[in-house]
Amino acid sequence: MIAAFRSATTNTARALELVRMVLMFLVLGGLLGYALELYVIGHWLPTLQSQIPFYVTIPGVVFVAWIFFDRTTPWVRIAFVVTMLVFVATGLLGAYYHWLWNMLDAGEVDWSFTFAMENFHGFRPILAALAYTNMGVTGLACIYRAR
Amino acid sequence: MIQRLMRAQTDDERTLAFLQNLFLIIAAFGFVFYGVEHWVIDHQTLTHWTALIPGWVSIAGAPLALAMFFSTRRWLTYAFVAVMAVSFLTGLTGALLHLVFNASDLGVSLFSISGFLESMQVPYRPVLAGLAHTHVGAVGLAVGLTAWVKD
C-alpha cells in the first residue's frame, strides 16, 4: 500500500491508496485495541471459543502489517483475504453465541421477539462481537481491486 | 457519492467511489446506531453535561452522512468534515473521561498500572466503547476529505 501510494501518478490513485492506508491503519489499531480490551476484561476463559478472538489477532496483525509493504505476492493476498473472512465469521459467530448464552443464562432458548430482545441486553454484549466483522469487512474492502 | 460512482470513468475512480460509498454507509449506520444506543442506555440522562455530547454528535452526523450520498456540495462537505472531526475528538475525549471517571469512582490513580487496569474493567462505563465515535469520525474524514478528488 505504501509503495502504491508513493508511485501513484494521478490524484484519484493517490486518494484511493490514502483511503486504503488510513482504513487499514484503523483495522490494525482495532486488532491491537480489542485484543488488549478482551484481555483486560477477562475474556481469556478456559474455553476454546473464548480464546478465538486472541488467536485470530495473531495472523490479523501479521498480515495487515505485511499488506502495507507487499500486496503483490499471491500467497500473502490469499492469506490476508482468508484472515479477513475469518474475522467476519468470528464476529458473526461471537454475536450469535453471546446472544444464545445470554438466553441460556435466562433459562431457555426462545427466539420470540420480546424474549430475544430482553437477552440482547444481557451480560454478554452482542454488538461488541461484531467489531471483528467490521474489521474483516474493512480489510476486504481495502484489498478489493488493489493491484 | 452515488453520482460519483455512476459517473466513474476509470478503474481507480470506480474503486475509490465504491470505497467512499461503502465507508459512508458504515459512517451513516454508525451514527444512527450509536444515536439509538445512547438513547437506549440513557446516556443523555446522566448528570455530567459531557454525557450529552455523543448524542448531539450523532444527531448532527447521521443526516449529514445520509445527505452526502446524494450531494457533495461545498457547504455540505465542509459541514460533514467538521462534524466528522468533532466525532473523532468526541471519541478520544469520551474514552479519556470514562477512564478518569472510573478511576475517580474506584479511588485509584491512573498513573499506576494496577489503577489503570482496574479503571479499564468497570463494566458500566466502558473505556474503549467511547472510541467508536473516533472510528466513525475517522472513516467519515477519509470519505469527506477525498470527496472532490479528480484527475
Image: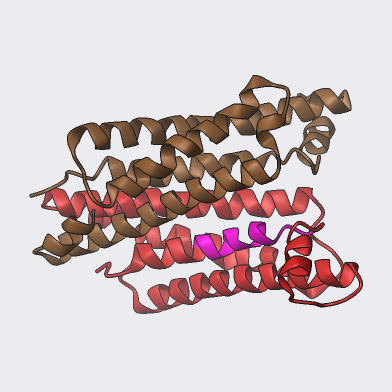
Chain colours: A red, B brown
Quadrant location of residue A54? bottom right
The one of A117 and B86 positioned closer to us in this rendering: A117
Residue B61 is situated, as x and y percent measured from the top left of the image, at 42, 39
The one of A146 and B126 positioned closer to us in this rendering: B126
Quadrant location of residue B125? top right
Residue A96 is situated, as x and y percent measured from the top left of the image, at 69, 72
Q: Residue at x 35, y 41 (%)?
A: B64
Q: Residue at x 92, y 72 (%)?
A: A107
Q: Is residue A116 left or right of residue B91?
A: right
Magenta stretch contains residue B134: no
**Is residue B129 in view?**
no
Residue B94 is situated, as x and y percent measured from the top left of the image, at 61, 31
Task: Note whether A78 is above or below B103 in the view shown.
Answer: below
Task: Note whether A1 is above or below B108 in the view shown.
Answer: below
Task: Note whether A118 is above or below A110 in the view shown.
Answer: above
The one of A9 and B143 positioned closer to us in this rendering: B143
Q: Is residue A11 left or right of residue B107?
A: left
Q: Among all residues in the image, which is located at the extreme right?
A: A107
Residue A70 is situated, as x and y percent measured from the top left of the image, at 35, 64
Q: Residue at x 43, y 63 (%)?
A: A139
Task: Note whether B95 is above or below A136 in the view shown.
Answer: above
Q: Residue at x 39, y 56 (%)?
A: B25
Identify the magenta region: A124-135
Considering the whole magenta stretch, tell me its main secondary structure: helix
